[in-house]
Amino acid sequence: MNLYVLSLSAFLIITAFRLFFAASLNLTPDEAYYWVWSEHPALSYFDHPPMVSYLIKSSTWLFGNHPWSVRLPALLMGVGSTLLVYALGREIFKSKNAGLLSAAILNSLLIFSAGMVIITPDTPQMFFWLLTLYFSCLAVHENKTAHWILTGASLGFGLLSKYTMILFLPGFFLFLLLTPQVRQTLFSWKPWTALLMALLIFTPVILWNYQHDWISFLFQLRHGTDSRESPGLRYLFEFLGSQAGIFSPLIFAGFFWALWKGFKIGRKKELYPFALLFWSVFPVFGFFIYESLHTKIEANWAGFAQSGSIILLGGFLNQRIRDRDEYSRIIPLTVVMISLSLILTVLVHLQPYFKWIPLSVERDRTNDLIGWDKLSSIKTRFPDTASLPVLTTSHTLVGEASFYLQNPSVYQWGAPHRITDLTQANPLPARGSTFLLMTYDDDRFSDEVKALFSRITPLADIPVYYPKQNSGQLIRTYHFFKGDHFLGLPLRTNG
């Protein structure tokens, strides 16, 4: 069978399985929270820029509110990312097989496959990072105005996805500055026009932050870089270990080999696209390495930066495979490398269904994908609660309760910057109203919340088990209460 037909068939089968996963699993708390955003369109939000909410709204407007329709944009952008990796590998290495191998590596990775099933800001950022890389490669090579404008546009849409998209700029600047073949580009008006285009597209987020005292910019800056801890090398080793986990150890090790080769080859005349890939990775990964010496870095934060490494690894492995002296050694290594990554990815995808990996309830993150639909049983047991406003303890619980209770009046307490906070309710539930209060596990309502009502009485505890039987493993327990006679919001002083 033709290699391209075989590759396409395999990709379609994998994509079909991902669609099944997307449809059969509950929304994670973060996904449900982003869905709440989509129900409250805005120029931006406290936590992130607005792209993820726009994508979700476009899909649910067309297909209704279902887990699969919330996640459909992630699946489509994953397909787009695969095509971009293939195109970049094919063009830079002048080989279709290099593009196919890069795409195969990409689709074997746990972090990428999860991003095609679960919708978060990381998914559109990955797509627009690759799109910016693709157009910038064309722009530098052909110096056409259209390519520069498209580079700026894709960078702007990436900034609308996640703030860390800004890290594309230092690497690209260093590439232009340190690569003699393209250094003169810095003195052209075209790249600066591209930057202006990106800023224009990003203007709504700047405007929203200006209107809200720059709270989102400050929150993300402190969230990612502000720490007074002195953890030594602990967070560094945790970060490197997490990267080996989401990319698989062999592929992660292969990235360093591929980056070193890309750096050396990129210094040769007419081979500067290799330097572009290197500089798209090295400064970003170096930034997160530096930050891990001061604060904890989550595994997904740096995942997008390895896009160039994936292309370089696929291309260089393909070159070795074409070398008859290397063929017998590299083919088994490549098969083992991709197979181990794929096995890890499959095991994690099946974990919510079969729990094959023996993890405690607290450490098994796939539990976030199950049991939230059981929230709706409160309406079955107590039909009179269906129309009550709901108050919870966190923004993520607001998302799950909003989606699975299909209740537009769900709030939290204690986060006034978030649109989900009760203080942001418009209109505010009337004094004297009855609320349905909800927590889970060990969460408890604060004294401030208790003071909002004349009386709070327990209503029901609803456990979630895996398997879905009382004899199974307890995943979490929802606690419902009735809050009688809402007293209104307390007056806040400036002192």
Image (tube, rainbow, N blue to C red):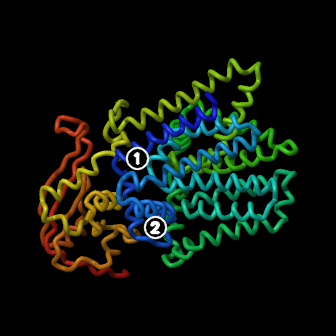
Assign the N terminus to one quadrant of the image: top right
Q: Amino acid at mark 1?
A: Ala
Residue 355 locus on image (x, y percent) = 33, 33
| Residue 215 is at least partly visible in this image | yes
Q: Which mark is residue 86?
A: none
Q: Is residue 233 left or right of residue 378?
A: right
Q: Amino acid at mark 2?
A: Phe
Q: Residue at x 57, y 51 (%)?
A: 126
Residues 464 and 491: in front is 464
The mark that comes first in sequence, 2 or 1, is: 1
Residue 477 locus on image (x, y percent) = 22, 48
Q: Marks 2 and 1: CB-CB under 8 Å?
A: no
Circle 2 or circle 1, nearest the eye: 1
**Is the residue marked by circle 1 packed among few (<14), some (14-19), or many (20+) residues within 10 Å?**
many
Image label count: 2
**Quadrant housing residue 416:** bottom left
* SS label for mark 2: loop
Residue 332 locus on image (x, y percent) = 62, 21
Residue at the disc numbered 2: 46
* SS label for mark 1: helix
Q: Is residue 16 left or right of residue 367?
A: right
Q: Residue at x 31, y 39 (%)?
A: 361
Q: Residue at x 49, y 63 (%)?
A: 48
**Quadrant housing residue 452:** bottom left
Assign the C terminus to one quadrant of the image: bottom left
Residue 61 vertical placement versus 131 (above, below) = below
Q: Residue at x 48, y 64 (%)?
A: 54
Residue at the disc numbered 1: 22
Residue 328 locus on image (x, y percent) = 69, 18
Residue 373 vertical placement versus 344 (above, below) = below
**Is the residue marked by circle 2 packed among few (<14), some (14-19), or many (20+) residues within 10 Å?**
some
